[in-house]
Image (cartoon, rainbow, N blue to C red):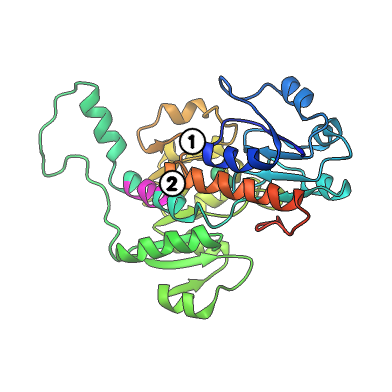
Amino acid sequence: MSRVVVTGRIPEAALESLRTEHEVDDWQGPGSIDREELLRRVAGADAIVSLLTEKIDAELLDAAGPQLRVVANVAVGYDNIDVAACAERGVIATNTPGVLTDATADIALSLILMSTRRLGEGERIIRSGQEWKWGMFFLLGSSLQGKTLGIVGMGGIGRATARRAKAFGMEIVYQSRSEIDPEIAAELGARRVDLDELLSVSDVVSLHCPYGPATHHLIGAEQLEAMKASAHLVNTARGPVVDEAALASALRAGTIAGAGLDVFEHEPQVHPDLLELENVTLVPHLGSATVETRTAMAVLAADNALAVLGGQEPPSPIG
Ligand code: GLV
């Protein structure tokens, strides 16, 4: 029997499968686990099932000890994990690709619609008790039909977002490290371009790239300046891909028309200037937040941990 530390609350189905074979120490809250408490609890763990709010770095791996075999992240993004430090210690790191693709693409499309159709503004008007009445020119947004969506990072979530946007009549361009399967590109009518071209031709730019040193502030003042003044930026990837201060300035100055953000540079803090602006939709990191998706993510993470503890290949190793 191995010792499995779970760094936060996860769906029962995943805990049950871990408990059938192992001793499970799961943090029950309230809130997220305090760093000191986590460092104490991981001591002697053979497996850590981690949430994206916890940093799994060299200090934590050393606090766990040399018996640690696997870190199973309950997220597709793994910028919270020092993968190199895991590899140095022979610890296998895993993530949860695939199972959250549709849920996250749904949120990207929701933000595209919320931003282009000014739904947040409309809601705020009603909730604030302001007088309003249907008007020919009241809260006009922009249509998606015939417009261009620029997808930055054409992995599974980027492709799923493109598929949805195509159903809304959008043309697709994308920037990605590699060309996608030609059949999928043909089905989506998607054209690969470089970032400069993507920024200049897109009516909506949606970010779906992983976060790391190569994508830190990928979208800053210069890139926002390169976008159309009528364009919208949507981020469901990771906050620090966007320079949030530069975005707030661009939104205020009308450099771009609007933005929809599910993730934040200093999460859970939101840049105070963004809170003052009407032309930005802000939602609290809900990309994968459905009962079905979170359950599937946790079960996949548990399967990853169980496989490694059982001497098997995990279903979704990182890298
Ligand atoms: C959520 O943000 C994830 O990376 O799974």
Q: Position of residue 233 (x, y in %)?
A: 45, 49
* Magenta highlight range: 107-113
Q: Which residue is mark 2?
A: 292
| Label 1 Cα neighbours within 10 Å, binned few <14 / some 14-19 / many ≥20 | many
User: What secondary structure do most residues of the magenta stretch adopt?
Assistant: helix
Q: Which residue is mark 1?
A: 248
For the point 24% across and 24% down, which residue is it?
A: 127
Report the image quarter containing ligand 1.
Answer: top right
For the point 47% across and 47% down, which residue is it?
A: 293
Residue 315, picture quadrant: bottom right
Q: Position of residue 246 (x, y in %)?
A: 55, 39
The answer to whether mark 2 is within 8 Å of ligand 1 is no
For the point 42% across and 47% down, which residue is it?
A: 256
Callout count? 2
Q: Does the magenta-highlighted stretch encompass residue 110?
A: yes
| Label 2 Cα neighbours within 10 Å, binned few <14 / some 14-19 / many ≥20 | few
For the point 49% across and 38% down, which residue is it?
A: 285
Q: Position of residue 239 (x, y in %)?
A: 57, 40
Q: Earlier in the sequence, mark 1 or mark 2?
A: 1
Indicate left or right for 62 with 1 as reference. Answer: right
The secondary structure type at the circle numbered 2 is: helix
